[in-house]
Image (spheres, helix red, strand yellow):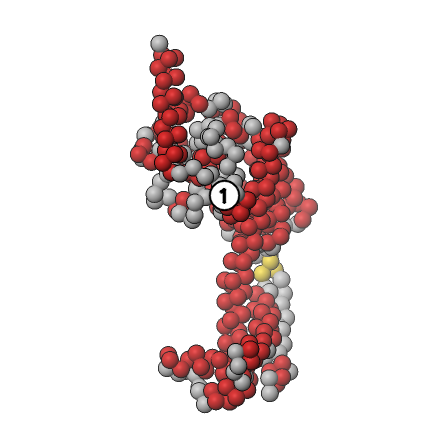
Amino acid sequence: MANQTLEFQVLPSYTLEPVPRLLPWISDFHLSLVLPVAAYWFMSFIFWYIDRRDWFSQYRIHTPEEFKQRNRVTVGEVLRSVLFQQAIQTALGLAIGYLTDAGDFRGREEYNVAAWAGRVHRARDVVPWILAILGIDAKMLGQQLQAYKLPLKAPEKPLALLSTVIYPHLGEGLTYGFTTWEIWAAKVIYWIVEPAARFGIAVFFSDSWQYFWHRAMHSNKWMYRNMHAHHHKIYVPYAFGAFYNTLSEAFILDTIGTTLSLMLSGLTIRQAMCFGTISVMKGVDDHCGYRLPWDPLQWFNEQNTAFHDVHHQSWGIKTNYSQLYTTFWDHVCGTICSKSQEEIEQLYEKGRVMAKELQFQKME
């Protein structure tokens, strides 16, 4: 009986057409290059203004004296370096987009839903095997449940659904040869589960790439001296210093890492736009220097401003290599900072006192 539905299953035809632009005056691809840069400077301006107005000083990790005394690079040098780096990365992005003919198309949505419905339909063959392992006769159970018809009262719905899984030909209404519940399940997979999985792949690969390259740059003396020490001239992080890197580090960590993340995850241009923009915003926030309890970017997990700031200190530079989204690899590889919160606060206080003393010495 189950094969009866297979005879009627047909995947719909489709015609592809370019997705209309989000903004009429710029393509989605070019917007995906501009938006992260705009987000970087917009967020940096917000934190700069907060700093200038001395708002939320109770949440500041470092004092203004530390900012002046401990950093080994001027604000002007950081600004010039970041702007130059972003110009280079944007040019590389344009080149990659030109070579790959980047663009999103629509028109295949109904086809993809039907394709997922086919996978769901084939997957239901596994249900009798699972029930058999549990000692349940699937055929007998299905026959006993055939009396149930949809719509039903809430307590009976799970039983009726199980019946349609075991005997899909009993479902009411067919679309392209699939039952209603198969199409419904396919839509959930296509519109929700699949995009979430793609974002998950992009996040995991990006975090893995960032962690192991970042750790390598601290483990290898040549790499640290020639590629990464540049970033650690900033002992007291601030928002627009987040991307203060050498071009070689920026190319390896950001350009190659992000490109591979997008390619492996299969994100669309618009999904990549969201991923890239959120990643930049997270990077800026991780360097902002404020532990803001109402900042949503600091809610996800321990990978936040306080976590990354430890890595910028001389006593934490060999720990907390994770960047942006998770601290998974720091925990797995045993590189998480082992100091207690009390010890960390004592070290921070020691840094504040030393910076204040240095300032007094210069004033004398």
Residue 202 in view: yes
Point 44% across, 29% down: residue: 236
Q: Which residue is mark 1?
A: 324
Please tell me how many numbered marks the rendered image carries. Answer: 1
- Quarter of the image with the N terminus in it: bottom right
x and y percent of residue 107 in the render?
Answer: 59, 64
Q: Residue furthest right?
A: 99
Q: Nearer the viewer, residue 155 or 20?
A: 155
x and y percent of residue 11 in the render?
Answer: 62, 73
User: What secondary structure is marked by label 1?
Assistant: loop
Residue 26 in view: no
Point 57% across, 65% down: residue: 109
x and y percent of residue 268 in the render?
Answer: 57, 54
Q: Amino acid at mark 1?
A: Leu
* 159 w.r.t. 364: above or below: below
Point 53% across, 26% down: residue: 80
